[in-house]
Image: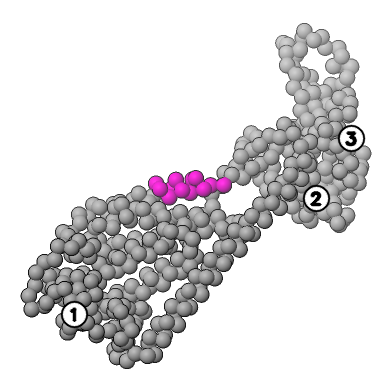
Amino acid sequence: METFIIYIIKSSICLGVFLLIYVLFLRKTTFFKFNRFFLLSGFIFSLIIPAIKYTYDIVLIAPISSLATNSMDKNSAIEYTLNIWTIVFAIYIIGITVSLIKQIFIYNYLRKIKNQGSVYQNNMYTVIYNTSVKSPFSIFNYIFFTTESLDQFEQEVIMKHEIAHIRQKHWIDLVCAQCMLIIQWFNPFAWIYLYMLKENHEYLADSSVLSTGISPALYQAVLINREFNKPIFSFTNTFNYPKSLNRLNMMKKAKSPQWKKTAILLIVPVFGAFIWASATPRYILTSDTESNANFREMTESQQSARDSIKIRDKKTERFTMTNIPISEGQSKSRPLIIVDNKKVEDINTVSPDDIESVNVLKGEDAINAYGEDGKNGVIRIVSKKNDISEAMIIIDGEIADQESLKSIKPDNIEKIEILKGISATKIYGEKAKNGAIMITTKK
């Protein structure tokens, strides 16, 4: 629910961006066909762009001891958030239901007008004559018409106008707009978008009628008669009317320069910024040591039969995914747990604060080290209580013992390095499972 509602909100914002660009740069131009394509593209891209998911990784360093507390707080937060999104989703569904019921009433009204009127059938369209129609209009391939208060010339002009709507299949645009309006019933941009779309349809139909050779002055007079819904002009004479109507102004307007179409290029940086701003972070929790991070991931994996563990390589900054079969309900698929070289049954008996390092073995490495017991993987834990004397000692690149270590004077030591867990076994093998102390003496 939360994901869907956020998607709808993002879609509304995208539609608003298209609307803003259209109003600022394209609405007053004479690119009627181009504007129609732009407005239709707005419907499509406002559904596609929010579906593009872009994520980026953020690595958080946190003490491993705080994981249990954080999970409890997270559960309570999820429960509270779930209630809010459930309410929002319920309101959204109610709005869609009301919008659909409204469309059903409109459909029934049109069907009633059609059944009560007289019908004229044509190959391309059907004309419904009915006196209850206040102003002629078209929908799909139907033209709803009235002859009241219209002389013959007005009827011919208006009919050509409505036929132009049908020929150019403007109903497809209106169906798309109506579907978008149902989905985004709460979005004021969607309502304005529908108005702009209808306005551009009128420009297209007007242009089509004028292209048949009808005098612009006579056509403008018809528009003014329809504007006031009564005969203002007598068609025996023609003259200009000073009222500023959008459609009249657009007829008089000179063709817009082609370079203004480049305004749509604004979409690229705008939506690039939109995708960047809506990118979602993917938080990766890690403790102060890589071993503790692996321990945390392994304990979380015990909640499912096959869980996905993400391991971060600090040197290459790459992430790899691996599946380790761990299930509390099925003992056969549980990994072998070794704490200070002793087998334990429950990993939860080990306090995170007492852990020095964690080493995870899988596959052949686990079997080679522990035989059949390690076939499901091995979690090897070294506690802080473990004596450092068990660590492997390397002096100037050669394996040494405790006596050799004690014989070295502190003044002769140039550098000491300590490796633990995976870092030690990766270089020196299983002999360094308890860690490695690397000493470089002064030459």
Question: Quarter holding the C terminus?
Answer: top right
**Magenta segment includes 332:** no
- Measure the C-alpha gap from mark 1 to mark 3: 98 Å
Where residue 329 sits: x, y (%)? Answer: 86, 56
Which corner quadrant holds the N terminus? bottom right
- Span highlighted in magenta in the image: 269-280
SS state under label 3? loop
The amino acid type of the residue labelled 1 equals Glu
Residue at 73% x, 48% y is 76
Question: Which of the 4 image quadrants contains residue 204?
Answer: bottom left
Q: State the residue at coordinates (89%, 17%).
A: 403
Q: Percent from the top left, x then y, of residue 126?
A: 32, 86
Q: How is the image coloured?
A: one colour
Viewer-nearest of discs 1 and 2: 1
User: Between 204 and 333, which is closer to the camera in this rendering?
Assistant: 204
Tell me the SS state at disc 1: helix
Task: Characterize the magenta stretch by its predominant secondary structure.
Answer: helix
Residue drawn at x 42%, y 82% as measured from the top left = 109
Kindly report the distance in space between the C-alpha atoms of the residues bearing marks 1 and 2.
Answer: 79 Å
**Pointer 1: what residue?**
154
How far separated are the C-alphas under marks 2 and 3?
Answer: 21 Å
User: Who comes first in sequence, dot 1 or dot 2?
Assistant: 1
Q: Nearer the viewer, mark 2 or mark 3?
A: 2
- Residue at image mark 2: 302
Residue 42 in the image: x percent, y percent? 39, 60
